[in-house]
Each structure stands twice: as C-alpha cells, then as structure tokens.
Image: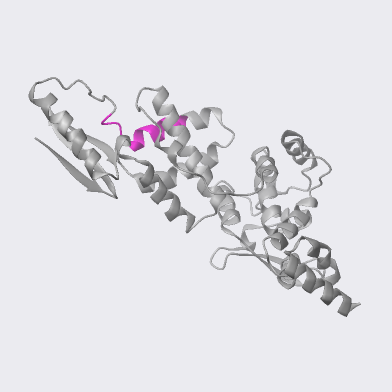
Amino acid sequence: MGTIRKRDNIWYVDFMYRGRRYRRAVGPNKTEAQILLGKVEPQIRENKFFDIDETADVRFPEIAEDFREYSKATKRSARRDQLSLKHLTEFFGDMRIIDIAPNLIEKYKIQRSQKVTPSTVNRELACLKTAFNKAIEAGKCRSNPVKKVKLFRENPPKLRTLIDNCDPQIKPIVILALHTGMRKGEIFPLKWEDIDWNNKVIWLGKTKSGKTAYIPMDNTVIEELKTIASHKKNPYIFAKGNGHYKESRKRFAKALQGSGIKDCSFHTLRHTFASHLVMAGVDLATVRELMRHRTYQMTLRYSHLAPAHKRKAMQVFDEWLS
C-alpha cells in the first residue's frame, strides 16, 4: 500500500490515498519512516486518513515567482534577489517544496561555497528563507526548512551593516573598495574594458605611483560587477550621463549614518582592506603588493595587526631597515 524510499540521505514515506499520491520527508532515520508508514497504512485502509496536506503539490518555481514579485515591489535589494533566485532555481528546479529538507539546503550551501563567498551564500539562503516565509503566509507551505540551516560566518557586523545601508548606486563602489583596496579616483573612471573576466583582474593602467597595475578580483567583486553588467550601456562601469561618477560623498555619508559608523571617510575603506588582510595572516610583502605601496614603511603601519609571531618578525625587519 505504501513504501519508504531514500533520497539524498533522507527517508520518505510514499503512499496513495483516494487516487492521489503523497510523499512525506521524514529525515535520515529509516526507523522513523517505517513507524510513520505503520501509522498511515491502517488509516488508509479504514478510510480515516485526514492528515491531507493541501500544500503537497506546491512546487519551488511557484514560491520563487511569488517572492520575485514581492521583492520587485518592496525591496531595494530586488536586483540582488533576482540573481539569488536564479541560482536557487537552478539547484531546486521543479521540486515540491515539501521535499526540500534541511539536508538538501545544506548540500546547496556547500556546493555554492565552492564557487562564491560565504556572504553571497548567506544572502541566497536569506532569500530562500524569506521565500518560504511568504509561502507560509500564503498558505502554500507549513514550515520553513531554512530555519534549521546554519549560515556561514562572514564579514564583521559593522561592514555588513554598512554594505546593507548603501543604496544600489553606491553599494558596488563600496564593495569594490573594501575587497580590493582601490582608491576612489581609481574606481570611478573604470570602464568595462578594464575588466578581465577570464583572469579575474582589473587593469588600472597608470597608478598614483606611475606604474601599471592589475588588481585581482575575489568572488564577491566578480558577482557584484556581473550583477550590474547587464544593466549598463555606458562604457563606464559607474556611469553618469555620458561620463562617470565623480563624487559620492552624500550617498556614502547617508550609508554611514544608517549603519551608525562615525569618523570614517571613503579612503578608510582602503585601510580597512589592508587591516583585514594582515589580521587574516597575509604576509606584509603581499599586502604591500596588493596595496601598491611605494615603500615597506607604508605597509609597516599595519604590522601591529599581524599575529604575534609575525609581529615579532616584522619588528626585527623594521630594526634592520632602520
């Protein structure tokens, strides 16, 4: 009358009632699935099975489309949500939402983390979680499996708050500064032709020091630029009319105010980039190269942030230079 089946380490109870098929996700424990089937079968034989889930046939594309419309109408991050939904739909396809269990979401989380940053995965999971919440409100779903999935650790809260408070025009500029250490004067004039997608670098041409430089892009920068790439006809990445942005002081000040950050200028983002590199254990020689400092003394300003053994080594190095 009914069977139990295993898929992706999850056991399901599969049965028919009044010509309709029901498939319930139980979990990784086979015994629990057998117990549930043992309870359901007598109810079916006696025509007393009343636990009929009217949401059983609701599929993922339906709740994804509902959330897409909600996001477009109410959220500043609608464009980011559209991209998240694209990746989520590629993974979950036409699945019934009752079959989307926490362990399957964990599988998505792990697979995506091999391609993008933890913060990007977290944004996509947040999107999925809201989609399920909206489905519950609409009576299309009974529970939210994303609640049982832990998010990745990511950027310090202040930086995350700053990025979240940036409007769509300045957000990619701030992300670029935080993830590359580029100066404002280097970011604003960037053109799409300066982006080497294959080698994941940005070509700066002549820098402040008079040298030609290439800036490596991490996954966060690549995804942010690709998000806005399809919407830009102007040769400049950060376009304004026929040219490019020359100032963002008011927008940046508004983002700082919204995030409660004080005593911070746009150039502070460059120092933040260098500080986080050092705190992450990156050697100062590499930091100097990424920051494009002319001398080691300029980079040594960040040495106090290095782990203790590196701090001691750089102290010896500094004394030797002196």
State whether the magenta stretch is mostly helix, strand or loop. helix
Is 145 positioned to the left or the right of 307 in the image? Answer: left
Residue 30 visible within the image: yes
Q: Position of residue 47 (x, y in %)?
A: 10, 20
Which residue is at the front of the view, 265 or 23? 23
For residue 218, which quarter of the picture?
A: bottom right
Q: Position of residue 262 (x, y in %)?
A: 81, 40
Q: Count the marks: how many?
A: 0
Q: Position of residue 255 (x, y in %)?
A: 73, 38
Please, is residue 201 above or below residue 168 in the view? below
Q: Residue furthest bottom?
A: 320
The quadrant in which the C terminus is found is bottom right
The quadrant in which the N terminus is found is top left
The colour mode here is one colour
Question: Which contiguous range is marked in magenta?
Answer: 56-69
Residue 68 visible within the image: no
Is 84 positioned to the left or the right of 24 in the image? Answer: right
In the rendered image, residue 60 lying in the magenta stretch gets the answer: yes
Please, is residue 276 above or below residue 160 in the view? below
Which residue is at the front of the view, 273 or 194? 273
Is 12 positioned to the left or the right of 303 in the image? Answer: left
In the rendered image, residue 297 lying in the magenta stretch gets the answer: no
For residue 98, which quarter of the picture?
A: top left
Q: Position of residue 123 (x, y in %)?
A: 53, 43
Which residue is at the front of the view, 164 or 309? 309
